[in-house]
Image (spheres, rainbow, N blue to C red):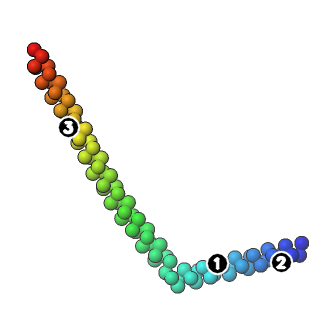
Amino acid sequence: MLFERAGNALKLVGDQYLARLFSLLSARFHLDQWSASIHNTLEVAEGAYEVLENQASAARSEFMEVIVIGLIAFEIVLTLVGH
């Protein structure tokens, strides 16, 4: 039981030490700025993806409209030729 208590106390002290060490290393290596830069880059990439997706969707819609108009014209021609 004494061994478990000592182990738990060391874990608590170890966690505090590791948290402080991470905090110091984070400040030293500017991890907050690096994270913000990555976040901004991902936002730009997401914006570019949305633009490309919208363009592809518009092109697909226009293509389908042309096909429908072509089919309607084909039906009209077949109707006129059939008489």
**Precedes in sequence: disc 2 or disc 1:** 2
Above or below, 47 relative to 4:
above
Residue 6 location (% of width, % of height)? 83, 77
Q: CA distance from mark 2 to mark 3?
A: 78 Å
Q: Which residue is mark 2?
A: 6
Q: In the visual, does 46 lie left or right of 29?
A: left
Q: In the visual, does 13 lie left or right of 80?
A: right
Q: CA distance from mark 3 to mark 1?
A: 63 Å
Are circles 3 and 1 on residues that touch, CB within 8 Å? no
How many numbered discs, if any? 3
The quadrant of the rendering that contains the C terminus is top left
Within 10 Å of disc 2 (Cα), the crowding (few <14, some 14-19, many 20+) is: few
> 50 or 68: nearer the eye?
68
In terms of secondary structure, where does tag 1 sit?
helix
Are circles 2 and 1 on residues that touch, CB within 8 Å? no
Q: In the visual, does 63 lie left or right of 43?
A: left
In terms of secondary structure, where does tag 3 sit?
helix
Residue type, mark 3 in image: Val
Above or below, 54 relative to 23:
above
Q: Which residue is mark 3?
A: 66
Mark 2 or mark 3: which is in front? 3
**Precedes in sequence: disc 3 or disc 1:** 1
Residue 14 location (% of width, % of height)? 72, 79
Are circles 2 and 3 on residues that touch, CB within 8 Å? no
Q: In the visual, does 41 lie left or right of 11?
A: left
- At x 29%, y 49%, the residue is 56
Above or below, 35 relative to 83:
below
Residue type, mark 1 in image: Ala
Q: CA distance from mark 2 to mark 1?
A: 20 Å
Residue type, mark 2 in image: Ala
- At x 68%, y 81%, the residue is 17
Q: Which residue is mark 1?
A: 19
